[in-house]
Amino acid sequence: MDNETTTLGFEIKYAGSPVFCEALLMINSYAVFLNNRYVAELQYDASGGWVQTNGIILPQNVIEEIGAHIDGQLD
């Protein structure tokens, strides 16, 4: 079995500045890092879209942007 870790990296705007965002695939969620610092855990809820389940409270528009990158809707 392959134990390869899946990580996505992309730039987002957070607090008015561009930051590097990484989303690390876990079992049922993604650990989110901004500029190499853990900030939150996100998971997809079929009834509510992307939701934050742990970490520093992120604005909903940031959660949605990160989710769109994870879904492959944004480059």
Image (tube, grey):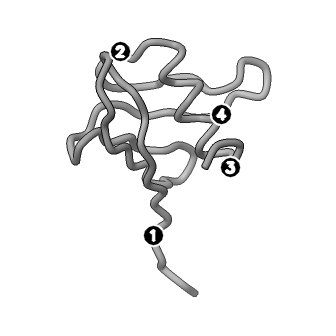
Q: Are marks 4 and 2 in contact (CB under 8 Å)?
A: no
Residue 57, numbered label: 2
Which residue carries the number 3 mark? 72
Task: Give the mark toward the camera: 3 or 2.
Answer: 3
Q: Measure how far apart labels 4 and 2 are at the Cα level.
A: 16 Å
In percent of the image, x 57 and y 23: which residue is there? Answer: 51
Q: Which comes before the other along the chain, label 1 or label 4?
A: 1
Q: Assign a secondary structure to mark 1.
A: loop
Distance Cα–Cα, label 2 vs label 1:
25 Å
Mark toward the start of the polypeptide (2 vs 1): 1
Residue sticking out furthest to the front: 17
Residue at position x 32%, y 17% from top? 16
Q: Where is residue 44 shown, x and y percent of the image?
A: 65, 33
Residue occupied by mark 1: 5
- Label 1 with label 4: CB-CB less than 8 Å: no
Of callouts 1 and 3, which one flags the residue occurring earlier in the amino acid sequence? Answer: 1
Residue 59 located left or right of residue 61: left
Q: Amino acid at mark 2?
A: Ile
Decide which of tag 3 and tag 2 comes sooner along the chain. Answer: 2
Query: Does residue 8 sit above or below 37 in this rendering?
Result: below
> Which callout, 4 or 2, points at the residue further toward the start of the chain?
4
Q: Which badge, 3 or 4, comes first in the chain's sequence?
A: 4
Label 3 – label 2 distance at C-alpha: 23 Å
Amino acid type, label 1: Thr
Q: Residues within 10 Å of mark 1 (few under 14, many from 20)?
A: few
Q: Which residue is mark 4?
A: 44
Disc 2 secondary structure class: loop
For the residue pair 53 and 33, the one nearer the viewer reads as 33
Outermost right residue: 47
Label 3 Cα crowd, 10 Å radius (few <14 / some 14-19 / many 20+): few
Residue 74 placement (x, y as % from top left):
64, 43
The residue sitting at 78% across, 28% down in the picture is 46
